[in-house]
Image (spheres, helix red, strand yellow):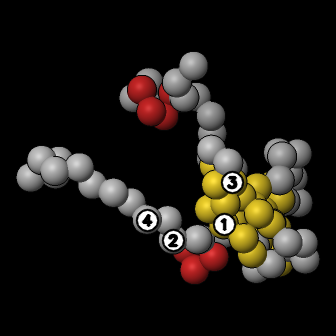
Amino acid sequence: MTPKAMTGEATTRSIKIPGPDHPITIARNPARIVVSLAGRVIADTRAALTLREAAWPLALGIGLAQLVMVAVSVRKGLGS
């Protein structure tokens, strides 16, 4: 299933303003966060942030400095 934002379809979700009825907090996450993709570690940090928004699931934020730079190979003929 493709998210509506990616398909260009209109969404009916309203924008929420932080306040007592819709609390939003951002705090430093004390845990070590390791993110892997296809069995390869792409981020390893103790400097992640945790976003809490009302009743939504937690979201983690990881800065670019915490990403593990992975060698990328470019095949001849692509990008030109």
Compared with 25, 53 (above or below) is above
For mark 1, does the 10 Å Cα neighbourhood hold few (<14), some (14 to 19), or many (20 or more) residues? some
Q: Earlier in the sequence, mark 3 or mark 2?
A: 3
| Residue 56 picture location, percent across and down | 82, 45
Depth-wise, is mark 3 or mark 4 nearer the camera?
4
Kindly indicate the quadrant of the structure image that contains residue 35: bottom right
Say what amino acid the circle numbered 4 marks. Answer: Ala
Circles 3 and 2 in contact, beta carbons < 8 Å: no
The residue labelled by disc 4 is 71
Residue depicted at x 80% and y 78%: 46
Q: Secondary structure at mark 2?
A: loop
The residue labelled by disc 1 is 43
Residue 36 badge? 3
Say what amino acid the circle numbered 3 marks. Answer: Ser
Depth-wise, is mark 4 or mark 1 nearer the camera?
4
For mark 2, does the 10 Å Cα neighbourhood hold few (<14), some (14 to 19), or many (20 or more) residues? few
Residue depicted at x 88% and y 45%: 55
Circles 4 and 1 in contact, beta carbons < 8 Å: no
Say what amino acid the circle numbered 2 marks. Answer: Met
Distance from Cα at disc 4 to Cα at disc 1: 14 Å
Which is more toward the observer, 62 or 14?
A: 62
| Numbered marks: total | 4
Distance from Cα at disc 1 to Cα at disc 3: 7 Å
